[in-house]
Amino acid sequence: MKDAGLRIRVQRDLREKFLEICRAQDKPAAQVLREFMREYVIKHEDTLPDVGDGSDVTAQEHPKTGNGQG
C-alpha cells in the first residue's frame, strides 16, 4: 500500500511543545503521530459500519523499518 501524507494545522505553541517532547524522548514526531493514530483507530474502529475492504491499517508494516511501529 502506498503511503499518504496528512497536513494539519495546530497552534504554534502546541506544535513547539510536542516537538520538544519528541526530541527529549528521541522519537520522530511522525512516528509518535502514527502510533497515536493506530491506537485511536483500534479504540474507535467499532464505531464505524463494517466496510469489508479487508484492510488492517493498524498492523501494516512500515516500508522503511519493516515493522508495524512505523
Image (cartoon, grey):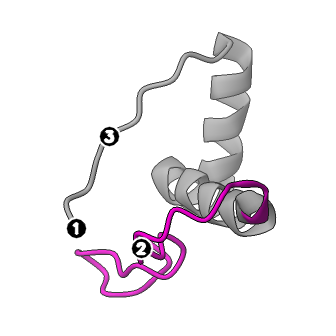
Quadrant location, the N terminus? bottom left
Residue 67 highlighted magenta (yes or no): yes
Q: Amino acid at mark 1?
A: Met
Residue 52 placed where, x, y %?
Answer: 48, 71
Instruction: Look at mark 1 in the image and give the residue it sits on.
Output: 1
Q: Secondary structure at mark 2?
A: loop
- Cβ atoms under marks 1 and 3 closer than 8 Å: no
How far apart are the two marked residues, 2 and 3, measured between alpha carbons? 18 Å
Residue type for callout 3:
Gly
Task: Report if the CB atoms under discs 2 and 1 are less than 8 Å apart.
Answer: yes
Label 1 crowd (10 A; few <14 / some 14-19 / many >=20): few
Looking at the rendering, the stretch of residues picked out in magenta corresponds to 46-70
Question: Does label 2 or label 3 sit earlier along the sequence?
Answer: 3
Mark with earlier residue (2, 1): 1
Vertically, is 6 above or below 22? above
Query: Amino acid under label 2?
Result: Ser
The residue shown at (78%, 56%) is 47
Q: Nearer the viewer, mark 2 or mark 3?
A: 2
Query: SS for tag 1?
Result: loop
At mark 3, the secondary structure is loop
Residue 52 sits above or below residue 36 on the image: below
Question: How far separated are the C-alphas under marks 1 and 3?
Answer: 13 Å
Is 31 situated above or below 18? below
Question: Residue placed at 58% from the left, 51% from the top?
Answer: 33
Q: Is residue 25 visible?
A: no
Q: Residue at x 47, y 69 (%)?
A: 57
